């Protein structure tokens, strides 16, 4: 199908749609999501996550469950989730063999992981969630009368070999998309493929980190020059904070790339932190909506928006690791921090927040990998840093971020925030590097209350 405009043939606009775990949790959820695709002729590429709960089970197996009974229990749970969907298909026989093969493969890999877990094995194992769900979703679309094709995204989603947090190779992805996806896009076929997973140069399976399907969808949208990226999830758009934390959180109709990127980066789980990078590069507007209630509309994320409120949203990111480095040699010296960062770079440790004093510097470690949990300072890095200064590591911390516009210039913004936090002890306050955010750490136990208090004071 193509459009003729001013005597030139231009390709039709294409929407890439991504459905998260709850949107493909069972047959009913998959059918609702498939209806959204069927109702939108532009939705030619669909990327989906594993069925809800499946990646968590696979991560448990990948971490190495030595107890046979425990392993069998997880495998049985995986079988049940997928079999329940198969049982409701009109033609279960079309997918049964593939699903059984994938589950036997999971069993084999889980046994290997029980003997010797590894990051490479983890990626191979956890990728099975998306490999399974795409078989079922393709069949559901076909049973609704669409013409859908299951495509293995590993033929296009080229990454480096950092298992668990692989970095996509954008130019190669575009070349591979030209080769493998563009020919299909010229037909009436809907491409159904996997979020989250990719492959390195040698064809070994990789993953983009937990929640990475959003990022996958944005990368594919960029690679095929899509017009719109849709992220379908379990809430009707982005809210002023996680509605699971503050019941009075309000939906946001329209938000800029800048603000939404800050929200994603600072922990709004609704979008993987890297999702908007490809969208910004290609200026692709992103829609976020609920597959359960598409009629409720959602949030549009674009380059420029009409409204730029001082306070836009609050985000919370837990599992923070704070490292404090102290040395008298830092006093009026030069080259000290350079040496600290050289060591961190050598161990591929990415730093998130930084605050400094005369003789010490505190930083938090970045973490987006597939195994989750608080990031660890590798032993070797700890040893190298200890030769230079005193090293203290603290966990059990969460990062609270206030996202807004011109926060640095807005008189009294900091007072409006901290006057409400007298009961708490915020640490590592970062304000000023970006006019879009103010953030700090608090103890995990008080983190939700801090967000609720601030939300009530600033947004309700
Ligand atoms: P999916 O499986 O569809 O990717 P996620 O669980 O990753 O869904 O993301 C959706 C969840 O993000 C919501 O259920 C909500 O609890 C959480 N969330 C966090 N911050 C926000 C926010 N600011 N607005 C809306 N949802 C948010
Ligand atoms: N299935 C993966 C996860 O649970 C990726 C995703 O859902 O985005 O993290
Ligand atoms: Mg998600």
Image: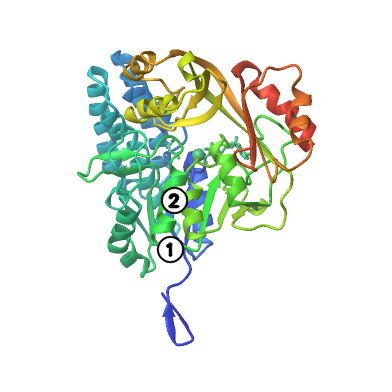
Q: Is 105 situated left or right of 295 in this image?
A: left
Asked if disc 1 is less than 8 Å from ligand 2, the answer is no
Is residue 343 shown above or below 47?
above
Q: Nearer the viewer, residue 366 or 220?
A: 366
Q: How is the image coloured?
A: rainbow
Asked if disc 2 is less than 8 Å from ligand 2, the answer is no
Task: Evaluate whether residue 115 shows in this view.
Answer: yes
Q: Is 303 situated left or right of 59 in this image?
A: right
What mark, if any, has residue 217 been given in the picture? Answer: 2
Residue at which label 1 appears: 225
Marks 1 and 2, how far apart at CA: 12 Å
N-terminal of the two: label 1 or label 2?
2
Q: Residues within 10 Å of mark 1 (few under 14, many from 20)?
A: some
Task: Evaluate whether residue 143 shows in this view.
Answer: no
Q: Residue furthest front?
A: 332
Q: Residues within 10 Å of mark 2 (few under 14, many from 20)?
A: many
Q: Where on the picture, by quarter, is residue 111?
A: top left
């Amino acid at each position: 199908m193509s459009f003729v405009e001013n005597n030139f043939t231009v390709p039709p606009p294409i929407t890439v749609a991504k459905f998260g775990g709850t949107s493909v949790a069972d047959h009913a959820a998959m059918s609702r999501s498939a209806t959204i695709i069927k109702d939108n002729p532009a939705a030619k590429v669909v990327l989906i996550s594993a069925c809800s709960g499946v990646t968590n089970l696979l991560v448990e197996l990948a971490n190495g469950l030595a107890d046979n009974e425990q392993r069998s229990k997880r495998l049985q749970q995986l079988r049940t989730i997928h079999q329940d969907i198969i049982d409701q298909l009109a033609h279960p026989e079309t997918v049964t063999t593939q699903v059984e093969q994938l589950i036997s493969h999971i069993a084999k890999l889980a046994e290997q992981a029980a003997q010797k877990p590894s990051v490479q094995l983890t990626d191979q194992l956890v990728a099975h969630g998306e490999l399974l769900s795409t078989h079922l979703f393709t069949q559901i679309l076909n049973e609704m009368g669409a013409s859908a094709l299951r495509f293995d995204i590993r033929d296009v989603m080229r990454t480096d070999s950092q298992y668990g947090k692989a970095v996509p190779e954008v130019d190669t992805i575009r070349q591979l998309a030209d080769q493998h996806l563009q020919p299909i896009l010229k037909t009436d076929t809907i491409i159904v493929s996997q979020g989250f997973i990719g492959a390195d140069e040698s064809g070994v399976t990789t993953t983009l980190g937990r929640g990475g399907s959003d990022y996958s969808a944005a990368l594919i949208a960029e690679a095929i020059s899509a017009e719109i990226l849709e992220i379908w999830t379990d809430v009707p758009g982005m809210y002023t904070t996680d509605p699971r934390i503050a019941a009075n959180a309000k939906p946001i109709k329209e938000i800029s790339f800048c603000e939404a990127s800050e929200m994603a980066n600072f922990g709004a789980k609704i979008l993987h932190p890297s999702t908007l990078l490809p969208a910004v590069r290609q200026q692709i507007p992103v829609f976020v909506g609920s597959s359960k209630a598409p009629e409720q509309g959602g949030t549009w994320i674009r380059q420029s928006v009409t409204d730029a409120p001082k306070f836009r949203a609050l985000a919370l990111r837990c599992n923070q690791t704070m490292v404090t480095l102290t040395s008298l040699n830092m006093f009026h010296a030069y080259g000290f921090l350079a040496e600290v960062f050289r060591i961190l770079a050598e161990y591929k440790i990415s730093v998130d927040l930084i605050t400094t004093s005369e003789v010490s510097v505190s930083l938090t470690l970045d973490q987006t990998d597939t195994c989750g949990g608080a990031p660890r300072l590798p032993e070797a890095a700890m040893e190298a840093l200890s030769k230079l200064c005193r090293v203290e590591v603290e966990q059990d911390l969460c990062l609270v971020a206030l996202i807004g516009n011109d926060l640095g210039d807005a008189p009294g913004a900091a007072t409006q925030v901290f006057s409400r936090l007298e009961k708490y002890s915020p640490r590592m306050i970062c304000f000023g590097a970006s006019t879009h955010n103010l953030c700090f750490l608090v103890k995990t136990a008080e983190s939700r209350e801090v967000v609720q208090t601030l939300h009530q004071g600033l947004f309700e």
